[in-house]
Each structure stands twice: as C-alpha cells, then as structure tokens.
Image (cartoon, grey):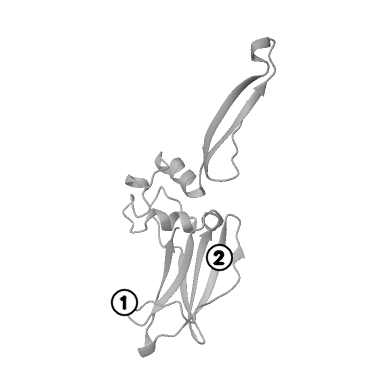
Amino acid sequence: MLVFTPQAAGPRGGSLRIASSDPANNPFTVLLNGAGLTHLEAWRLLNFGSTNNTGNGADLASPHHDGIPNLLKFATGMAPGSAGSQPVSVGNDAGGITFSYSRAKAAVTDGIEFAIEWSDGLSDGTWSTSGVVTQAPVDQGVTERVTASIPAGSGGRGFVHLRVTRP
C-alpha cells in the first residue's frame, strides 16, 4: 500500500524505485504525482464532492438557506450539512460589548483572516476594528474560543460583526 501524505497544498511529485530482476529495468521507477489540498479544499471535497469554489460548495453559498455562507461555516467549525445558527455570543461588560466566537484551527492554518468589527450604525464604511481588545484564544480541540472587548457605541447602541476572509 502506498499512502500520499503531502506536507503542503499544491502539486507534488516524486518517484518510487522498485528492485527488479529485469536487467533492463532495474530498478523499475514509477513516477508519482498528486496534489496536496488546503483544509478548506478537503472540507469542500468531503462535504460537496469537489474542491472547487463553485456551486453548493462555493465560499458564499448557503445551500441550507440559513444565511450562513460556507466560508463562515468552515472558519468557525460549524457542520456544513445542516442549517445552523451563528456561532457567536454577545454580552455587555463595564466598558462596552463582549463578543465571542469559535474559530477552526484548520481555518487559521489555511490563512483565513478573522476581524471583529464594530459600528455605531449599520451604514457601509462605518465599521472599525479600532479599540477591539482580543484575549488569548481558549483551546477547544479542533476549534478555539476567541473573546474580545469592543468599545461602547455612542447614543446607547452599538453593532458588532465577525468578518471572515480568505487570502
């Protein structure tokens, strides 16, 4: 049995040399080629049958019509095959808002970027990361729990969201 275990994503190659009793082909060389997958590509292949960022497996697709795009489900360790709710919690602390979310370690390894943004209103262009103080993540196995403090909004209200992007 030959097992392919690439150490990185992308095309990989090698050769297998087998001793042979045929003097013309000793050793007998077999060229090997394969492709290492990112964690996101492996997740897509497992759950949608393709590594491609298309159709039901696309980053922005929500095949279960729950409003949660696939990239967010992958990045936060949610089950892709069923409808779910946002994996966040919001609370108040003495100086503002406390925001917590789960992030998949595989997503961090793949270079997925996470940003907690806040705003006094819901208008585009008003979201900021200024003043966000993030605590050290708490290990939860395949995910980490991230908690941050966000400044209180003016006018007695504030909004916060998690922006997830991939390189």
User: Mark 1 or mark 2, which is nearer to you?
Assistant: 1
Depth check, front residue: 10 or 164: 10
Q: Position of residue 63 (x, y in %)?
A: 33, 49
User: Against 7, is 145 above or below?
Assistant: below
**Residue at 41% in and 55% down:** 71
Q: Position of residue 152 (x, y in %)?
A: 44, 85
User: What amino acid type is highlighted by mark number 2?
Assistant: Arg
Q: Which residue is mark 2?
A: 145
**Residue at 44% in and 41% down:** 45
User: What amino acid type is highlighted by mark number 1?
Assistant: Leu
Q: Sequence-wise, which precedes: disc 1 or disc 2?
A: 1
Mark 1 and mark 2 in contact? Answer it, CB < 8 Å: no
- SS for callout 2: strand
User: Against 64, is 28 above or below?
Assistant: above
- SS for callout 1: loop
Residue 67 seen anywhere in this rendered image of the structure: yes
**Residue at 58% in and 54% down:** 142
**Residue at 49% in and 82% down:** 131
Depth check, front residue: 75 or 98: 75
Q: Which residue is mark 1?
A: 122
Q: How many badges with numbers are in the image?
A: 2
Residue 2 seen anywhere in this rendered image of the structure: no
